[in-house]
Image (cartoon, helix red, strand yellow):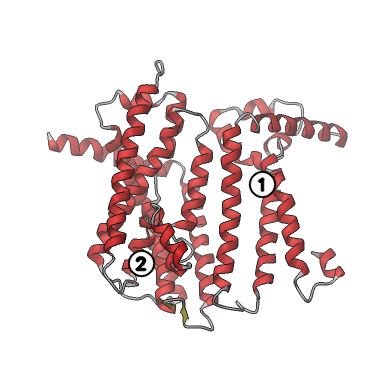
Amino acid sequence: MDIKKTLRLFTLYSRLSFRTIFQARTGIFFFMLGKAMRFLFLFLFIFLVFSRTRIIKSYDLNQVIVFFLTYTLIDNLSQMLFREVYRFRPLVLSGALDLILLKPHHPFLRILIGGIDFLDMLLIVPYAALIIIFACRLPQISLTGFFIF
Amino acid sequence: MLKYVMRKYLTVFTTTVKEYAAYRLNFLLWRFRAVLNLIVIFFLWNAVLEKQNTFGNYGKESLLTYIILVNLIINFVLGTRTAEIAGEINNGDIINILLKPVSFFKFYWMRDLADKAVNIFFAILEVALLVYFFKIPLITPHNILLFIVLFIVGTLISFFINLMLSFIAFWTTEVWAPRFVFFMVVSFLSGSFFPLDLLPKPVYYAMLATPFPYLYYLPTKILVGQTDKIIYFEVLMAFVWLLLAWLLTRLMWNKGNRNFSFWGR
């Protein structure tokens, strides 16, 4: 399958996913609230630990925060791209997977990247901004190190 | 008669346990995830306490014991099958239970108990292995009687809150999002990562006004002996929240039933 057609289908599935997500407005509010709370709570937890200690296994507060933010960003990116895998099991159990296998494209296009999760996409910006802010506080950061990161 | 009723609900219990045998890999991976969670949080605290013997008002052994025990207790308190009720309300399958000669609440309490029993059984084995292999220093449990009382209260509060989260389905199909928020809140405000009394005093007292500390933080705190005085207020609040949770659940169930209609399934 050529890349152009794959991209067109990916865009189509993402558009459909966008419409599906925004049909449930209350759901959007609660999911965003839940994701924000999880992030905030873990952030506070790190601060709580470092309120009574300065170093954990040679890592200081800023280094631990950069670690946490990097994990959050990567986790968020993968959830944004591969949200559809969460729906794979019900597809198999209900038999609806047959309908995907019959389509004239690779089934992974639908069951793996079949629609971007736009809620996760919204959160990437603040996460990336926070990484930059806290990474800049690290004394040992260099331009080469940043690009390797 | 009593024997017949007991047998009926015992069958619900055993059938639920057998359901886990249908998707064994699913269950094993679920347990694997639980062990990973425990290992990560344990080694984090172990690293924090490597160069200091106390953290706040907790000694090293008390804090590590708290982390191990709280993760054990979570398996029982939060283990639930009530999440499926929301789907059953939305697709009408709940009618099949309502028509059966069983109490809806007792039916789901037995399903929950089965889930809790299976999870705690495996959790005890996992924790025992971790304690043995990593030579984790545990302290002797304290106040076991008070712990048992608060443990039962916490389990019941959790059961009623979970039921309420599913009863939302009587009014909307968007049921997963509020449950997601609940789990985010519970994971932090119930003390899964750290004992809540490590927080600044005003924040800690504000939290005591919510039902979350009574799920598993308070029972675990009592078990590790972190109570220098009798905690009448906390015990009273636990019972107040149990009563409130029960009343609200009954209210939602009654109102929801009046609101609900479906046709033959």
Q: Is residue B263 visible to the viewer in this orientation of the structure? A: yes
> Mark 1 belongs to which subunit?
A
**Which image quadrant is residue B146 in?**
bottom left
Vertical placement of residue A125 versus A103, above or below: below
Measuring from the top left, give residue B81's x and y in whole percent.
Answer: 40, 41
Say which of marks 2 and 1 sits in front. Answer: 2
As drawn, the label of residue B133 is: none
Quadrant of the snapshot with the C terminus of chain B: top left
Mark 1 and mark 2 in contact (Cβ < 8 Å)? no
**Left or right placement of residue A110 versus residue B224 in this view:** right
Vertical placement of residue A30 versus B227, above or below: above
Q: Amino acid at mark 1?
A: Gln
Measuring from the top left, give residue B151's x and y in whole percent.
Answer: 30, 57
Q: Where does label 1 land, which residue? A: A79
The span from disc 2 to disc 1 (Cα, nearest Å) is 36 Å
x 62%, y 30%: residue? A97
Quadrant of the snapshot with the N terminus of chain B: top left
x 36%, y 33%: residue? B252
As drawn, the label of residue B221 is: 2
